[in-house]
Image: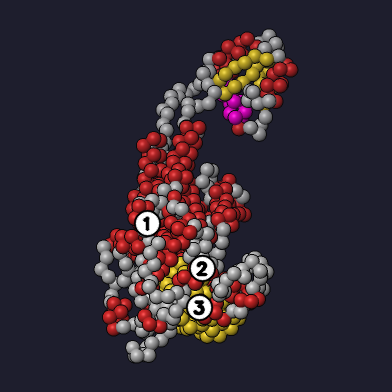
């Protein structure tokens, strides 16, 4: 092992002392403006590249951001796809003298599925929901009794359809001849409701997880502290998360909306510019929430808890999978000001109704307000070490 | 700032430094002066206040009282400039495992105005073969050399190394010693902490032994070893003609274990 220092160990270093402050040459070098670097070697580009690399080298993150929403959309889209009108299952008590003619009348209506029961099995089929309605013919030809639950809309519907079939079977002639023309309106199906909601949820999830997790990991590994010991700009550090988010944002929008549009024909009726602007604002706003979640936490366990605490209410209340109007009127004002509600409402209004920019302005203001407030709160609270 | 070349200033000057945490006083009136071009060692048992002291000097912690002057500048006024001039290796930084050696150093390089070439630094720390390997695949010694490389890439005037060789095998340790010696040979200053007396004896021009937040002995390793009366040493080491620095250390700080 070579030792480049010929001097005896432990002697004073005064002999090879370098004067401080710096020599003229060192000072000149120190004051020289930033060495000209290519854009890719600038600290902003490098920090952003690091975000990129860390993300794409984490297969789980790629899965949850890009693949999972597509799988979810595909699964739910298929489960709730538009089918022909549902068949109505009804039961007939087959023991009465007129039962056979009632059954014959009902079977002429193709929307009905008719089954014959005796008294007790009929009651059981009704009770267990196997049939929506039970027809109890009487001994006389001119009367029939329907047994059903008035509170069930499918039973009330069955009452109308069955009664019509019975009356027509008994010889009723309709005074007006009606024909049907069927349409399916794109934009009113479940998948149309779902895709904007999934996009909103995805924007929230990837912004909050993307920032929160990466920052707290860096903090818990003392990497944040190490970076603070360099001349790195703190603003650039935070901006690099935003910059890389924006690139992935475009990809997220493209994959999810592209899938919805091509696989299910989900409409994009509004201006694409407005749609992108909504997504951009949403990403920045949720980025602020992510930053705030990550501002103090020292461990990834702690930040996971905080992030779930922030996101869970919005998954439920903000109308991702079902309309938020299902919740009582009293809580509606609170639901309306949640950022994800504003994002989902704006996305749906843009995509499904094709409204103008001005019409989604109130939602945009809510989204932006969340972004600004959380960002500054996060900066105030942020623990850099 | 207009000090002339004839009156060299200390690279690091610490006076009356104090820092208390909630329940413990970590640094308690510590004074220290490190000459420029010197390799200076801070020794002391766990919890003696070494890391707190060094982190205050690095501008990562602010002291409760006392003054710190680094390369003639103060953290209160010259933070930006000082960040450019210092190279720092912290005790337990874990660099991002997903990045390669090259990417990590390119990132750190991008922060500095007057950085060194990444390839040169990789050669200096002998990580050439691992240049494209992910940090997660490196051995302990390689990771530590990368940490030192991150400190060197900014072309610093003063290098702070906090336990740079802890947990390394003898080969890795010697490799780091060479590296530190070469840095010093360029006329630059090093302040390091270590638990290895052999390391301090080999590398350091002067050492300070710190305990309970202040310095209890200061001098070159030779001065310190010669000052110890070896007749009091316990029996296993009577054959020695002079004490080792380890003997000085243990006789000053005692044999009781200090667990953090």
C-alpha distance separating marks 2 and 1: 25 Å
- Queried whether the magenta region covers residue A23, the answer comes back as no
In the picture, the disc for residue B198 is 2
Magenta segment, which residues? Answer: A154-164
Confirm whether residue B11 shows in the render. Answer: no
Q: Do callouts 2 and 3 point to residues on the same chain?
A: yes
In this rendering, would A132 be left or right of A36? right
In the picture, the disc for residue A329 is none
Q: Nearer the viewer, residue A175 or A160?
A: A160
Query: Helix, strand, or loop for circle 2?
Result: helix
Q: Nearer the viewer, mark 3 or mark 1?
A: 3
Q: Do callouts 2 and 1 point to residues on the same chain?
A: yes
Q: Nearer the viewer, residue B85 or A201?
A: B85
Circle 1 residues within 10 Å: few <14, some 14–19, many ≥20: many
Vertical position of residue B157 compared to residue A44: above or below: below
Which residue matches tag 3?
A: B222
Vertical position of residue A294 compared to residue A191: above or below: below
Secondary structure mostly seen in the magenta stretch:
helix
In the picture, the disc for residue B127 is 1
Which residue occupies 27% across, 70% down? A35
Mark earlier in primary sequence (3, 1) = 1
Vertical position of residue A385 compared to residue A78: above or below: below
Q: Residue A131 at what x, y percent from top left?
A: 63, 23
Which residue occupies 44% across, 81% down? A12
């Amino acid at each position: 092992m070579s030792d480049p220092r010929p001097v005896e160990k432990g002697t004073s270093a005064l002999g090879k002392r370098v004067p401080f402050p710096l020599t003229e040459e060192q000072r000149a070098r120190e004051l020289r403006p930033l060495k000209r670097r290519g854009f890719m070697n600038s600290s902003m580009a490098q920090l952003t590249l690091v975000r990129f690399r860390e993300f794409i080298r984490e297969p789980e993150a790629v899965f949850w951001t890009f693949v999972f929403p597509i799988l979810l959309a595909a699964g739910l889209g298929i489960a709730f796809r538009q089918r022909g009108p549902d068949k109505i299952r009804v039961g007939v008590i087959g023991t009465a003298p007129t039962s056979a003619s009632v059954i014959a009348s009902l079977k002429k209506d193709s929307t009905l599925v008719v089954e014959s029961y005796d008294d007790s099995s009929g009651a059981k089929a009704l009770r267990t929901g196997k049939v929506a309605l039970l027809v109890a013919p009487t001994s006389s030809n001119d009367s029939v009794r329907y047994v059903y639950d008035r509170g069930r809309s499918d039973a009330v519907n069955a009452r109308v359809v069955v009664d019509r079939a019975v009356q027509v079977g008994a010889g009723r002639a309709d005074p007006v001849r009606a024909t049907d023309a069927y349409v399916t309106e794109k934009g009113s199906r479940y998948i149309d409701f779902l895709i904007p909601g999934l996009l909103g949820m995805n924007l929230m999830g990837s912004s909050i997880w993307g920032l929160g997790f990466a920052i707290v990991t860096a903090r818990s590994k003392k990497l944040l502290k190490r970076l603070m010991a360099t001349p790195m700009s703190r603003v650039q550090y935070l901006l690099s998360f935003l910059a890389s988010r924006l690139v992935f944002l475009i990809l997220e929008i493209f994959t999810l909306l592209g899938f919805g549009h091509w696989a299910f024909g989900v409409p994009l009726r509004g201006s694409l510019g407005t749609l992108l602007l909504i997504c951009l604002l949403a990403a920045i706003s949720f980025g602020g929430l992510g930053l705030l979640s990550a501002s103090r936490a020292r461990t990834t366990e702690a930040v996971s808890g905080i992030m779930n605490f922030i996101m869970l209410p919005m998954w439920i209340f903000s109308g991702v999978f079902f309309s938020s109007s299902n919740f009582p009127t009293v809580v509606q004002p609170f639901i309306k000001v949640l950022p994800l509600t504003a994002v989902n409402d704006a996305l749906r209004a843009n995509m499904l109704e094709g409204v103008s920019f001005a019409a989604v302005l109130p939602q945009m203001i809510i989204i932006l307000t969340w972004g600004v407030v959380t960002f500054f709160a996060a900066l105030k609270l942020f623990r850099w070490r | 700032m207009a000090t002339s070349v004839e009156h060299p200033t200390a690279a690091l000057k610490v006076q009356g430094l104090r820092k208390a945490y909630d329940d413990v006083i970590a640094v308690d009136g510590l004074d220290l002066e490190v000459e420029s071009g010197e390799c200076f060692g801070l020794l002391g048992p766990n919890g003696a206040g070494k890391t707190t002291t060094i982190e205050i000097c690095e501008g990562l912690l602010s002291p409760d009282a006392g003054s710190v002057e680094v390369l003639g500048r103060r953290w209160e006024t010259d933070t930006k400039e000082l960040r450019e001039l210092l190279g720092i290796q912290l005790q337990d930084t874990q660099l991002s495992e997903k990045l390669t050696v090259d990417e990590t150093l390119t990132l750190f390089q991008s922060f500095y105005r007057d950085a060194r070439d990444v390839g040169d630094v990789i050669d200096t720390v002998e990580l050439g073969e691992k240049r494209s390997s992910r940090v997660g695949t490196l051995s302990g010694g390689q990771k530590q050399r990368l940490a030192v490389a991150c400190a060197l890439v900014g072309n610093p005037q003063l290098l702070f190394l906090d336990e740079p060789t802890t947990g390394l095998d003898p080969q890795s340790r010697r490799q780091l010693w060479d590296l530190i010696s070469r840095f010093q040979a360029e006329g630059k200053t090093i302040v390091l902490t270590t638990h290895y007396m052999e390391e301090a004896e080999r590398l350091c021009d002067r050492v300070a032994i710190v305990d309970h937040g202040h310095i209890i002995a200061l001098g070159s390793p030779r001065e310190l070893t010669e000052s110890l009366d070896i007749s009091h040493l316990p029996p296993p080491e009577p054959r020695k003609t002079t004490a080792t620095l380890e003997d000085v250390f243990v006789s000053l700080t005692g044999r009781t274990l200090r667990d953090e």
